[in-house]
Every structure is written in C-alpha cells, then in structure tokens.
Amino acid sequence: MAILTELARRGLSHPNTVSFVKRAVSAQNGEGEKIEMPTWGIVLIYVSFMVSVVFATLVNYTLKEVVTTLCMIESPVAAITVSPSTHESGDKEEKEGLLESGPTITLVNQKPITSSIRGTIKHLVANAGRLARFRGFGSHVIYALGFSLVTEFFAAALPRVPGQAIFVAGLSGAALANIHATWTHKVVAMPTEKSYWQRVPGKSNWKTLALPAAIEAAMPYVSIYITCGFAMLMGLHKLDQENLGEYNGGQWTWLVVRMVSIVVLAITCTLFLCLPAIVTLIRIEASILPEDQDTIVPFDRTFGGKVVSKVVGGTGVVGFLDAWRSFNWEARRRLIKLFVKVFFIIFALIFVIVHVLAFEIFAIMGPALGKFLAQAKHDGILVAN
C-alpha cells in the first residue's frame, strides 16, 4: 500500500501529468481544441473496462490461487485392478491350473486431478457446485486487506533501514498466519456449514503457522533484493547514464547477456526460494485441517508416514522440512507446468482485453483519436519511438 501511495504521489506531481491535466481543463473551458466523445461511448468504455477487470481478476484467482493450491496438497492415488485369469478355450488341466493361480492384481497409479486445469475445475464443480471455482474468494479478500493494514502499521513502527520491506512482510505474514490458514482450509476442504470464524484455527496453532507464514510473505522481497543487488553489480543501475546509440556490437552483446542473466536469476529465485516457501506453508496449513473435514482432492495426512494422527497420540502436524520433502519431484514438475500454463493464459487474456478496449476507443472516437494522440505527443505526454 505504501508503494502504491508513493507511486501515485509521484505520478500526480510529474510534469507530464500536470501538462495533461492543464490541457484537459483548458479544453473544458473552451481554450484550445475540444475533443468530443459521446456520453454513450464513455459509458460503454467504462462498463467494458470494469467488466474486463472483474473477469480477469476472477480468472486469475481461479487459476493462480485455487487450482495451484489444490495442486500443492494433492497426493497421488493408486487404484487396485483385479483381472480374472480365465480362458474360454483350453483343456481341463489348463483351466484347473489357471484357477489355482487365481486372479491377477495390478496396482495402477491414477492421473492426478490437478494435472489438468479443465479437469480440476470440473472436479470442483462436481463436488462443490458451480461457484466452487471461486471458493475462498471472500477469505482471500479479508486476508489481503488485513495484510495491507498490518503492513502499514509495521512500516510506520519500524525504522527505515535497508531490508525493511523483508522484515515488515515477515512480521505481517506471521501476525496473520491463522487468517491465511483459514483461506487455505476454505479452498482445500469439502463444503461445510461452518462459518468463517468457526474455520479460523485456534491460538494453539499459531506457533506452528507463524514461521512458515513469515518466510512465505518475506521470500518475494528477498528475491527482489537479490535480483536488484545482482543488477547493480552488473552495472545495470547506471544504464540511463550511458549513450546506447554509440554502443558497438560487443557492447550490445554484453548488455543482452547482462539482461538475460537478470531474468534467469529472477526465475531461479522464484523456483528455489518463493515456490518452496508457498508450498511448505500450504501443506503445513492443510496438515492442521480438522480430521472431521475431508479434502476435495486426495491428500495424504500422514505425509508418507512422517505424521501421526492426534487420534493415536501424535501431533497431527507436519514439520517444516518434511512438508517440502514430502512434495516429490513429480508433484513439483506438475506444479511448475501449471504455473507456466496459468502465465500464458493470463497473458493471452490481458492481450485480448487490451485490444478489445482499444478497438472500442477507436470506433467511438474515430478521427478525433488521432488528433488527441498527435496533440499528446506534441505536448510531450507521449514519446515517439
């Protein structure tokens, strides 16, 4: 929230923004060329924009939050098939031998539900209703708002030192650990009549959830600090002071290498820092799900025999390292493939939305759009390539 506020303040004080506002005001007062747009056109663009934002938000939530969370807890399931060993033809001795051998028992590993986005959504709808693809959305909003407020508090309370964002995010995540677990339980559990507050884990669970929640919240900022620090070591922070037009072939090659290395480092941090942190948190949260509630996808509560149920005297909670180690390589590959699919789906959706809105603006404004862009370029609001 603080970052958004600072960006908004700087954006409003930027000379180009001031010029744009002055030009808009002068146009309304009859000073300069007035660009007219019909009222119905303004309403159409506004409604289209709002509908697009809501639609993109819901699609992003379903794919990036619900489907991926289910993928993080799903355990492979094996089905036992029994094949009778009989033949319609053959002599009596053969048949007697076959009967003695008995049927053939085969153990077949079933395809995980979350290996397919469409299959996961169909499974959700079949078991929890049509709105199941958006399950937990209200809890997610509550957590997001709470996290913003708590972050503001810690940002104001802690001194401004290098790495402050990491400590603020970690403390905020730990403070709201039980609230995040409530959202996870809403997503992974079968439908229940319990209210939101009845779903919130007890205070005794906070000690179990605080550390993984803090690490999960802080790890994205750790990744950013590592990436930005490496970029500074590579001299990319001084790029605006260099004259790129005078670069020769070798310099351009070195610049491309530096850029690619930053992208590779960012992806590496995501895979080896952020991803394990979120998977570990989700699996620990799922381990404290009350035993009278079933999960909507197959879930091994014993984590491969590492966790003993409370019913027989165990803790019923998986350890921090075991939560990640029990998420085997096959499941990790499946999750990474899922994130790649989600990225391209969201990218394609935004691409289509932007072009639809641009077409609407062009169709409504017509030639006036060209005049507006030309005037904006003349005033320095748009920069020609």
Image (cartoon, rainbow, N blue to C red):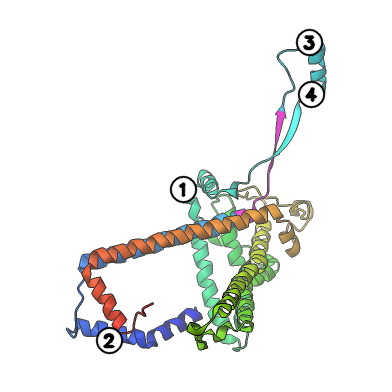
Disc 1 and disc 3: Cα gap in Å? 57 Å
Disc 3 and disc 4: Cα gap in Å? 17 Å
Disc 1 and disc 2: Cα gap in Å? 49 Å
Which of marks 3 and 2 precedes in the sequence? 2
Q: Identify the residue at horizontal 51%, vertical 67% (top origin).
A: 142
Q: Identify the residue at horizontal 49%, vertical 52% (top origin).
A: 133
Which tag is nearer the camera, tag 3 or tag 4?
A: 3
Q: Position of residue 363 (x, y in %)?
A: 25, 63
Disc 1 and disc 4: Cα gap in Å? 45 Å
Residue highlighted by disc 1: 130
Q: Position of residue 280 (x, y in %)?
A: 68, 63
Which of marks 4 and 1 precedes in the sequence? 4
Residue farthest top in this picture:
91
Residue highlighted by disc 4: 102
* Helix, strand or loop for disc 2: helix
Disc 4 and disc 2: Cα gap in Å? 89 Å
| Pick the front one: 132 or 176 | 132
Q: Which stretch did the figure color magenta?
A: 71-82
| Amino acid beneath label 2 | Lys
Q: Is residue 133 magenta?
A: no
| Amino acid beneath label 1 | Arg
Label 1 with label 4: CB-CB less than 8 Å: no
Disc 2 and disc 3: Cα gap in Å? 100 Å
How crowded is the residue under tag 1: few (<14 C-alpha within 10 Å), some, or many (20+)?
few
